Amino acid sequence: MKFKMLHTCIRVMDLEKSLRFYTEALGLKETRRKDFPEHEFTLVYLSDEDGHYEVELTYNYNPEKPYVIGNGFSHIAVSVEDLEASRERHMEMGYEVTKLMGLPGSPPRYYFVTDPDGYDVEVIRAS
């Protein structure tokens, strides 16, 4: 049996702020949107240029408080050719960014940037 990864869903407090992060900071493109006003939520799907996998932003209208990101969720990951330039750009954009890191005994090859809702995105040097 063959499975294909389709999307990861994250719930967001401010749809426009989250869209700005995922499109401007990570270069994803909105592929489709489904509005359900009678049920008070909107789904927005974003993907990279290959379109093989999507991030689904779920916006529930008028959320009362931020979502709790459980201790079981860690992060999503993307790759980029110029890691240092990407990190500098994310810092200039005002996002929370970690130092460059590497696995034990390895040179630095990734960092984390935090989206507006507190979800971590690992940015890894493309190999």
Image (cartoon, rainbow, N blue to C red):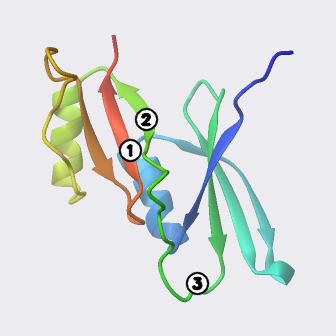
In this picture, residue 34 sits left or right of residue 64: right
Residue receiving disc 2: 77
Total numbered labels placed on residues in the image? 3
Residue count near mark 3 (Cα–Cα under 10 Å), binned few <14, some 14–19, many ≥20 = few
3D distance between C-alphas at marks 2 and 3 = 26 Å
In this picture, residue 33 sits left or right of residue 53: right
> Quick check: 17 above or below 7?
below
The amino acid at mark 3 is Pro
Which quadrant would the C terminus be assigned to in this image? top left
3D distance between C-alphas at marks 3 and 1 = 23 Å
Could you tell me which secondary element the residue under label 1 belongs to?
A: strand
Residue 99 figure quarter: top left
Residue 124 figure quarter: top left
Residue 52 rendering spot, x and y as whole percentages: 66, 26
Residue 46 rendering spot, x and y as whole percentages: 60, 45
3D distance between C-alphas at marks 1 and 2 = 5 Å
Residue receiving disc 3: 63
Which quadrant would the N terminus be assigned to in this image? top right
N-term-proximal mark, 3 vs 1: 3
**Residue 121 tag number:** 1
Which residue is drawn at the image coordinates 29% and 48% (left, top)? Answer: 113
N-term-proximal mark, 1 vs 2: 2
